[in-house]
Image (tube, helix red, strand yellow):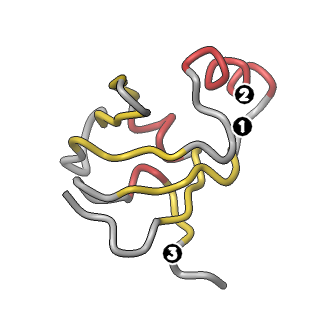
């Protein structure tokens, strides 16, 4: 198993990753699509205290997402990424 694949909720502050998959139903997928979170997009974690919501950046924008949602988003960490 590739160790760089993990849940977005476990990605540390300053790290970048590419969204690979989602663990959720149709409504969850639609919600992510509405937020602009799609497979293949690069995200950067701006704040992750490992409790509560995360703040992520996508391109020029920032989003706050709940921890439960973040735990259902599977990402692959980009090597050498750190602020």
Query: Pointers 3 and 1 in contact (CB under 8 A)?
Result: no
- Residue 76 point in image, percent of width and height: 55, 64
Residue drawn at 44 percent across, 44 percent down: 43
The vertical placement of 20 against 55, above or below, is below
Task: Give the image location of residue 63, x and y in percent.
Answer: 36, 24
Query: Which disc, if any, is residue 24?
Result: 1
Which residue in the protein does label 3 denote? 4
- Tell me whether circle 2 and circle 1 mark residues in contact (CB < 8 Å): yes
Q: Residue at left 47%, top 41%? A: 70
Q: Is residue 69 above or below residue 45?
A: above
Q: Disc number at residue 29?
A: 2
Which quadrant would residue 75 be assigned to in this image?
bottom right
- The residue lying at 28 percent from left, 59 percent from top is 12
Instruction: Work out how far the residue at label 3 is from the one at label 1, CA to CA, in angstroms.
Output: 21 Å
The secondary element bearing badge 1 is classed as loop
x and y percentages locating residue 82 in the rendered image = 25, 63
Q: Marks 3 and 2, how far apart in space?
A: 23 Å
Q: What residue sits 47% from the left and 37% below the top?
A: 68
């Amino acid at each position: 198993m590739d160790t760089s694949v993990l849940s977005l909720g476990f990605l540390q502050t300053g790290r970048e990753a590419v969204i690979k998959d989602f663990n959720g139903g149709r409504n969850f997928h639609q919600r992510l699509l509405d937020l602009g979170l799609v497979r293949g997009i690069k995200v950067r974690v701006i704040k992750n205290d490992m409790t509560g919501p995360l703040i992520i950046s996508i391109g020029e924008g920032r989003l706050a997402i709940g921890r439960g949602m973040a735990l259902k988003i599977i990402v692959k960490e980009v090597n050498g990424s750190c602020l």
